[in-house]
Image (cartoon, grey):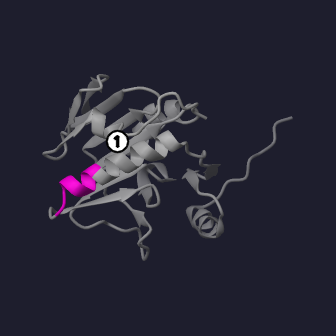
């Protein structure tokens, strides 16, 4: 006998999320608890955020780390990207400053529990965002960065970076991030959860 799973409206999810001790994503009616992070995950996210924030100081960009929620209307998804870059002012959902809709660049740090989802379905959802120009996936267990840059409305170019001395030349903004900076103080011996 199969049990039916309760589905929620976006409004019900937002109400529950405001009171929750732990964050969850919303996937077209389903509430999915977010996995806990590792120190490597946190270090990589922080390194990317800090580098973008420093290198773009004084320019018309906003950089956000994992506490800002993203709404993807065509797919009815609420999610918390590890790092988001917005050009100009953020477009907020309704009367809130906790949910944005217009990222130019999204960065996700991969984990064992979410890696396949981040590479497939989540990327499908992200591609429906009109402002999104670039998607970066970072492995936390070795030097490995996948970079997708939008080249036309229906095409994305993949560049695979896997050398410690490598450089990710961003396609959505005029900026480069070295893999050494992305992976600064990351311990590859750490056991990923």
Give above or below for 188 relative to 8.
Answer: above
Q: Find out whether residue 53 is within the magenta segment.
A: yes
Snapshot quadrant of residue 174 = top left
Is 64 left or right of 166, judged from the image as shown? right
Please report the bounds of the magenta region as a residue range.
51-57
Q: How many marks?
A: 1
Q: Residue furthest right?
A: 1
Q: Find out whether residue 181 is within the magenta segment.
A: no
Is 44 left or right of 54, judged from the image as shown? right
Residue 86 in the image, given as x and y percentages of width and height? 27, 58
Snapshot quadrant of residue 65 = bottom left
Residue situated in front as seen by the camera: 48 or 190: 190
Residue situated in front as seen by the camera: 102 or 35: 35
Dividing the image into 4 quarters, which one contains the N terminus?
top right
Residue count near mark 1 (Cα–Cα under 10 Å), binned few <14, some 14–19, many ≥20 = many
For image coordinates 66% across by 63% down, the residue present is 21
For image coordinates 63% across by 66% down, the residue present is 12
Is 95 left or right of 32, judged from the image as shown? left
Examine the residues drawn in magenta and state their main secondary structure. helix
Is 150 left or right of 38, judged from the image as shown? left
Residue situated in front as seen by the camera: 51 or 102: 51
For image coordinates 61% across by 35% down, the residue present is 193
For image coordinates 32% across by 39% down, the residue present is 182
Residue 58 visible in the current orientation: yes
What SS does tag 1 mark?
helix
Residue 40 in the image, given as x and y percentages of width and height? 48, 40
Snapshot quadrant of residue 60 = bottom left
Give above or below for 98 relative to 23.
Answer: below
Residue situated in front as seen by the camera: 91 or 152: 91
Residue 88 in the image, given as x and y percentages of width and height? 21, 64
Report the residue marked by disc 1: 127
Residue 168 in the image, given as x and y percentages of width and height? 23, 34
């Amino acid at each position: 006998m199969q049990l039916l799973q309760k589905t929620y409206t976006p409004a019900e999810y937002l109400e529950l999320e405001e009171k929750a001790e732990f964050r969850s994503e919303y996937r077209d009616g389903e509430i999915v608890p977010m996995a806990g992070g590792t120190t490597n995950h946190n270090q990589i996210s922080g390194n990317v955020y800090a580098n973008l924030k420093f290198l773009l100081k004084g320019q018309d960009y906003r950089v956000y780390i994992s506490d800002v929620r993203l709404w993807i209307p065509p797919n009815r998804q609420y999610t918390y990207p590890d790092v988001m870059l917005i050009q100009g002012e953020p477009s907020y959902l309704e009367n809130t400053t906790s949910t944005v809709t217009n990222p130019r660049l999204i960065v996700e740090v991969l984990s064992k529990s979410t890696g396949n989802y981040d590479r497939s379905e989540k990327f499908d959802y992200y591609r429906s965002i009109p402002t999104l120009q670039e998607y970066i996936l970072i492995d936390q267990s070795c030097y490995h960065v996948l970079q997708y840059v939008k080249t036309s409305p229906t095409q994305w170019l993949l560049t695979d970076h896997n050398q410690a001395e490598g450089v990710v030349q961003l396609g959505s903004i005029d900026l480069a991030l070295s893999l050494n900076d992305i992976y600064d103080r990351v311990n590859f011996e750490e056991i990923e959860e």
